[in-house]
Amino acid sequence: MPVVSRAVLAGALVSTSIVAASPAEAAKACVLGKWKSTSYTMLIQGVGAETHGSGLKGVRLTVGRTSLAYDFRKAAKEELIGYDLGDPSFRSQVKYAGKLNVKATVRGSKKGSVVLKPKTATGGATGANTQMWPEHQKLSKWKLAKNLRAGTPESFVPVKSSFSCSGKTLKFFSSYKHRGYTVSVGRVFTRA
């Protein structure tokens, strides 16, 4: 075989070995790293009732190979509007604070999935729900790690999500059932 052919063949083999990365290495190219939320939408649908959620800009998210870390300290509030048979029934705000860490399985590169291991949730992150309309009242306060460990879903921290990543933008989508309701969540992050 001529020297030029061997060099081209060797170059092709080197190129092939670089392209054929393991799933964990491929994920590192895009989804892993530090992110900041820019958009959040949530829809809870049940018989005759639905709730729309938005807000939560500024949540910091660090995606590692085996874990996710949320930092809510600079996050905007979640805005919730409820409807009963098409008519507005309530308006409330949820203020998240603190940090949450949870182990996870991250699969994929530009597209893939994240599955949390809820029983591993730690941290002091809290949520506090205040009804704004029809009357102003504090409704509840909870600890996110405790709820996740107990199997209670958190809309902004879904247990299972699919994702797409373009390098500068990371989009998550989740859909699940809870107590007869269907919950759909979309989250968009940019590199922090």
Image (spheres, helix red, strand yellow):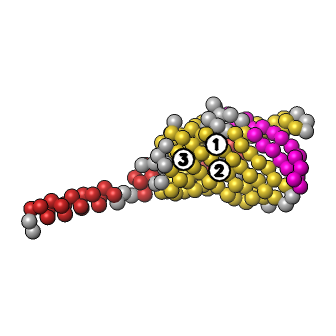
Give how far across and how far down residue 48 sits, in percent: 86, 58
The residue at which mark 1 appears reads as 39
Alpha-carbon distance for marks 2 and 3? 11 Å
Q: Is residue 87 above or below residue 138?
A: below
Q: Is residue 98 visible?
A: no
Front residue of 148 and 13? 13
Q: Earlier in the sequence, mark 1 or mark 2?
A: 1
Front residue of 124 and 113? 113
Which disc number belongs to residue 186?
Answer: 2
The residue at which mark 3 appears reads as 170
Quarter holding residue 38 = top right
Q: Is residue 89 visible?
A: yes
Q: What residue range appears in magenta? A: 79-97
Give how far across and how far down residue 178 sits, in percent: 75, 57
Q: Are marks 3 and 1 in contact (CB under 8 Å)?
A: no
The dominant secondary structure in magenta is strand
Kindly state the secondary structure of the residue where label 1 is placed: strand
Give how far across and how far down residue 76 sits, in percent: 68, 34
Kindly identify the amino acid type of the residue bearing the numbered disc 3.
Leu
Kindly identify the amino acid type of the residue bearing the numbered disc 2.
Gly
